[in-house]
Amino acid sequence: MMVFSFSEAAHLAKPLAEKLGIPLAPIEDRTFEDGEGKLRPLTSVRGEDVYVLQSLHGDETLSVHDRLCRLLFFIATLRDHGAARVTAVAPYLCYARKDRRTKSRDPLTLRYVAQMLEAVGCDRVVALEVHNLMAFQNAFRCQTLHIGMEDVFGEKIFQNKHDAPLAVVSPDPGGIKRAQILREALEAQLGQSIGFAFADKRRSAGVRTAGKLSGDVNGKHVIIADDLISTGGTLVDAATACRANGAKTCIALAAHGLFSDKAPKLLSSDLFETIIVSDSTPPLTKGVTVVSCASALADALNRLANSSHH
């Protein structure tokens, strides 16, 4: 097993390498005066089972397209130089939300990302808590491995919550399956039954309308679980509905903390006791609790590496 990463994914690469117990393979990363670049493995990859870590979000330093392009070119380079297998490890997968046509002539960008990865010779793709699991699995013809958020966030999230019953809430109908899987995992870990509810959110022309809550949260400690936090508006609406329905406390939980425009409405809100995210993208330092996804990633990579020996 050989693991490469780029400087922009260093926040995850170091803990992942530690969990795997192997050093990161060395890489040359140059940017030229004209804005073009060069990525080159500094060690032989011939016959190796290679994993490339890259988080595909955009930020001030690099756009999502820069990151994707760097990943594509590097995978192509590895294949050129005889790597036996190449796995893209993209904890945050870009365009995972663009998996359906909502308007006429809309693109299906998730599928195009899949086609590009396959075209350069990617054998497998590993991602963490994608927006829509079925769409993710169907977009790729190469093998995919999905890591659910329940593998990252364990019973720690309900620490010291013994004074009242617990509930998991989906902030919209689309996330019901995700929240139910999390709820089942927590029930197994905690050995107690946990309630369930969902908020009904309608979105039209970019405007969200907070809907009503289906399910009972009265007197309960509530976890509102979503795949990602962008502006945080959906979570604020859901928490408002939970509080109005008698929730004792609310915790916001998301695999990916994008915090677009710093998500002011969410982070300044007193609706939440805590906001918990993974480090799939470089995490905010203030106002959020960060749980590392490195050990869930390491487990997944070890499973893949072991399966390739048979």
Image (tube, rainbow, N blue to C red):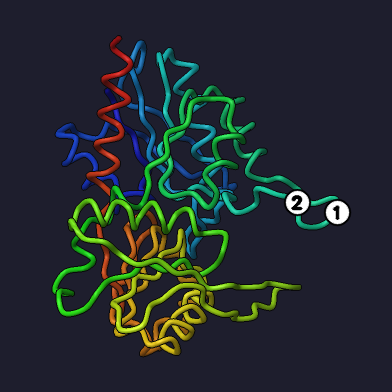
Residue 268, image x, y percentages: 40, 88
Q: Is residue 217 above or below residue 190?
A: below
Residue 20, image x, y percentages: 19, 35
Q: Which quadrant would residue 136 be assigned to in this image? A: top right
Q: Residue furthest right?
A: 104
Q: Are marks 1 and 2 in contact (CB under 8 Å)?
A: yes
Q: Which residue is mark 2?
A: 101
Q: Is residue 112 left or right of residue 158?
A: right
Looking at the rendered structure, which numbered label has been put on residue 104? 1
Residue at x 30%, y 78% (from the top left corner): 220
Residue at x 37%, y 35% (from the top left corner): 28
Distance, label 1 to label 2, CA atoms, is 7 Å
Given residues 176 and 288, the one toward you in this image is: 176
Q: Secondary structure at mark 1?
A: loop
Q: Which quadrant would residue 4 be assigned to in this image? A: top left
How many other residues sit within 10 Å of disc 2, few (<14), some (14-19) or many (≥20)? few
Q: Check disc 1 and give the amino acid type.
A: Ser
Image quadrant where one finds the C terminus = top left
Q: Is residue 284 above or below residue 61?
A: below
Q: Secondary structure at mark 2?
A: loop
Residue 34, image x, y percentages: 59, 47
Image quadrant where one finds the N terminus = top left
Q: Check disc 2 and give the amino acid type.
A: Arg
Residue at x 14%, y 34% (from the top left corner): 21
Q: Is residue 303 above or below residue 259?
A: above
Given residues 87 and 237, the one toward you in this image is: 237
Total labels: the figure holds: 2
How many other residues sit within 10 Å of disc 1, few (<14), some (14-19) or many (≥20)? few
Looking at the rendered structure, which numbered label has been put on residue 187? none
Residue 181, image x, y percentages: 38, 51
